[in-house]
Amino acid sequence: MTDIAWISTAISNARPQAMGALLRYFRDLDAAEEAFQDACLRALKNWPKNGPPRDPAAWLIFVGRNSGIDAVRKRAKQAPMPEEDQVSDLEDAESDMAERLDGAHYRDDILRLLFICCHPDLPATQQIAVALRIVSGLTVKQIARAFLVGESAMEQRITRAKARIADAGVPFETPGAVERSERLAAVAAMVYLIFNEGYSSNGGEAPARAPLCEEAIRLARLLLRLFQQEPEIMGLTALLLLQHARAPARFDENGEIVLLEDQDRSLWSRKMIDEGLALVDKALRHRKPGPYQVQAAIAALHARAATAEDTDWTEIDLLYGLLEQMQPSPVVTLNRAVAVSKVRGPEAALAMIEPLEERLSGYFHFFGLKGGLLMQLGRNEEARVAFDRAIALANTAAEAAHIRMHIDRLIKESAEKSSLQKTR
């Protein structure tokens, strides 16, 4: 129980609780991070000799807080005497630890920490980067690799984000019930963004960016432990699990996209699927549907289908209809059109998406779906135009290769048709 691997896992699991509490004490991200790092170094030195503490998070908070206070005192010797109210604050920071380690305090500390990372003044990419650095403890090098940017560029991005947080004067008070609910929604959205950053990679990037998906799932599980009766957090966690369960089958050996209907379902992670399905069922029993639950229910229908032909597209169409009411969006309608094409045919689906073209004129998936529907209807020239537009908008080489496959099929069919006419 004292080997380095166990210690690393214990520190990683305790990090959000410890960082949240230290942030509350010092009200400064850099100071909290320095205190936590010092506590980790002491843990690596002491735990192998003395055995693991009963509560690693409490140990790290206690040691980190004392280390941080020592650092404040050392700086104070080289600075003018502080104002009286600052001295009083320092005494408060040194008060007995008994006031802080109940579950509710942990919950508010972690939620505050996560909320600070997803501050609305920050762009989404900076929110994600700061959360992965401060909450998850990923190194700058790991984050840069996942975002496919240079290490120095990522360091600058995180530094700028932390400076904006410091300048924003974010309040550190314990959030009330209404504020907690608002914060939870913002944090859930940030976790979802982290997952999508990893999930939207192409085949060649997938190994480097998979840790983003795994970290998002870890954060979602953390939220679920803090808010065990919140059905939307159950839905979010289930959605991420069910999506990530398909990761081994999403790309072929050449790194090209494999569509859901063509994936080898034996490669899907049964363990993740079972956990996700259990959470979906539990969430829906609360009868308080939300967008994450609906998306998870859609993913669950795909997961429950033994083959692509077994998919309940009628139910998926109904669920997307419900999602359209909750979160009206042309992208949701586009996704629903896929289900409509399976239930009512490509013509009905095409009629559904054509009014969206102006709003989705820069969206790769719109033209990919439009080209596919036109091809099913035998309107090959129009399909070729849509596919060409999709290639121009492709975000990854895998997306472009997938569309070229359709174009090659059109060329082949056109050549076969021309050859047949000549023989006649």
Image (cartoon, rainbow, N blue to C red):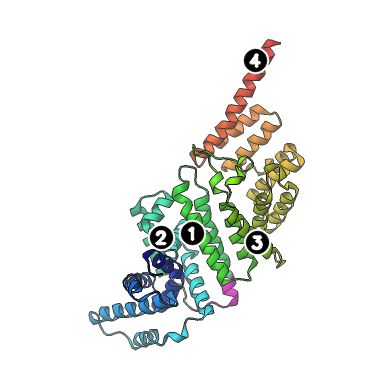
Disc 4 crowd, CA 10 A, few/some/many (<14, 14-19, 20+) = few
Queried whether the magenta region covers residue 302, the answer comes back as no
In front: 164, or 87? Answer: 87
**In this picture, which residue range is highlighted in magenta?**
173-181
* Callout 4 amino acid: Ser
Which of the numbered marks, if any, corresponds to residue 215? 1
Residue behind mark 3? 278
* Callout 3 amino acid: Ala
Residue behind mark 2? 138
Q: Earlier in the sequence, mark 1 or mark 2?
A: 2
Where residue 195 appears, as percent x and y from the top left, is 52, 55
Name which residue lies at 50% across and 52% down: 197
Where residue 34 appears, as percent x and y from the top left, is 34, 70
Which of the numbered marks, if any, corresponds to residue 419? 4
Q: CB under 8 Å between callouts 1 and 3?
A: no
Task: Name the side, left or right, on which 46 lies relative to 286.
Answer: left
* Callout 2 amino acid: Leu
- In this view, the residue farthest toward the left is 78
Let me know if residue 169 appears in the view. no
* Cα distance in 3D space between marks 4 and 3: 55 Å
Where residue 149 appears, as percent x and y from the top left, is 39, 49
Disc 1 crowd, CA 10 A, few/some/many (<14, 14-19, 20+) = some
